Image (cartoon, rainbow, N blue to C red):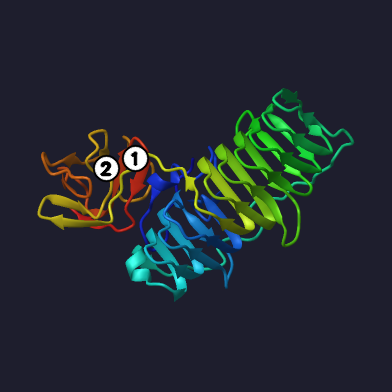
Amino acid sequence: MRTGVLPGALAILCALAFAGPADAINIGGTDYTLFAKTNVKMKDGSLLSIQGNVGVNDVGGLLRIGASNRIMGAAFADTMVFGRGAKVDNCAFNASTRGDPTAACTEISSTILPITAWPPVPVPVVSVGVLNPICPTDGALALAPGNYGDLKVKGGCVLTLSAGTYSFKTLHMKAGSRMVGASATSTFIHVLRLVVTEPRVTINDASITSISVGTSEAIKIASDSVLNNVRLYAPNARLRLHQGGVYKNFEGIAESITVDPITIGVPASCACAGAIAKSGATILLTAGCGLDNPANTYFLATACEGCFVGVGCHPASLVAGSATATSLSLSTPGGLPVGQYHVIINSPAGSFCTANTLLLP
């Protein structure tokens, strides 16, 4: 997973580590969990929890964050709507039309739009075949890469796909069926029209693209489904994620996205800091998360790059007894060259880099 710096707010690289499948699409320096051209509409409900970044690309684009929704990452859109009790780590918008952004957002800044040219990645050409594969009820089917017609995965069936490219006219998964690919970066499923599932399906390790054009739901994932290491891409139509789903290492990109209460990639042990300050030879981190994890390591660097050891990465020692879940103190390293330094935190969940800097030493 690539890392990126979030403009005008915090660099939530820890969130980015869980934003999508391995080698997620990097858009303008940021990896997104959900990214739409014109709008993302998140329904009300405390069960709607997203670990990662959410963005709406276009001028005039709308991001609706529903009541009690939680975005553990950054949110970008021209216009935002905030439901009561919504919480977002970082908000970048030009206007808000409803709700209280100061209550919902830990940090607020403006954003420059459009974020990228659309579509953000090329749309494949889909050449379908004449064979219509059927994965039988409570059975199994191993399908080789190639061009096919309509694919039906019946209830209880396990469909196994290899590394390679598959083209289908339509894809329909019945309730309780399962699809298993090789990985989201090697199993590519290209669909001419619609991708539709019934409830309680499981999809693992695949990248699914629908090239359908229009206002229809080109990709529709039904309720109580489980998706692991999956990318869904509908650049010219709608993506719909129904309630009760659990999505891990997930990325959804579409012209428009509607999200019911689901959980997307919420890991443990993520570390972050909402504010940094200098106090003599001590650096104070506050408004944070996961700072009491003893596995965390801390560095100072003049750029938000991956820091473990090496040129430009200066290890900073934790002041004994100072760490709580939300705050801690670091000792400024001796011999540090004069400069503007970010604080970088490496945790078991990934890396975090503060957008703000301190003049040190």
Characterize the local packing of mark 1: few (<14), some (14-19) or many (20 or more) Cα atoms within 10 angstroms. Answer: many
Query: Total marks drawn?
Result: 2
Tag 2 and tag 1, C-beta contact below 8 Å: yes
Q: Is residue 308 visible?
A: yes
Mark 2 or mark 1, which has the lower sequence index?
2
Q: As drawn, is 116 to the left or to the right of 9?
A: right
Which mark identifies residue 94? none
Q: As drawn, is 229 to the left or to the right of 234?
A: left
Q: Nearer the viewer, residue 313 or 42?
A: 42
Q: Is residue 184 visible?
A: no
Q: Nearer the viewer, residue 281 or 48?
A: 48
Image spot of residue 356 (x, y percent): 30, 58
Image spot of residue 29 (x, y percent): 49, 53
Name the residue rendered at 11%, 40% in the picture. 321
Circle 1 — which element? Answer: loop
Amino acid type shown at disc 2: Phe
Quadrant in which residue 313 is drawn:
top left
Circle 2 — which element? Answer: strand
Give the labeled residue for mark 2.
299
Q: Is residue 77 above or below residue 177?
A: below
Q: Nearer the viewer, residue 140 or 162?
A: 140
Amino acid type shown at disc 1: Cys
Name the residue rendered at 19%, 49% in the picture. 327
Name the residue rendered at 61%, 35% in the picture. 203
Q: As drawn, is 37 to the left or to the right of 172?
A: left
Q: Is residue 234 above or below residue 138?
A: below
Give the labeled residue for mark 1.
307
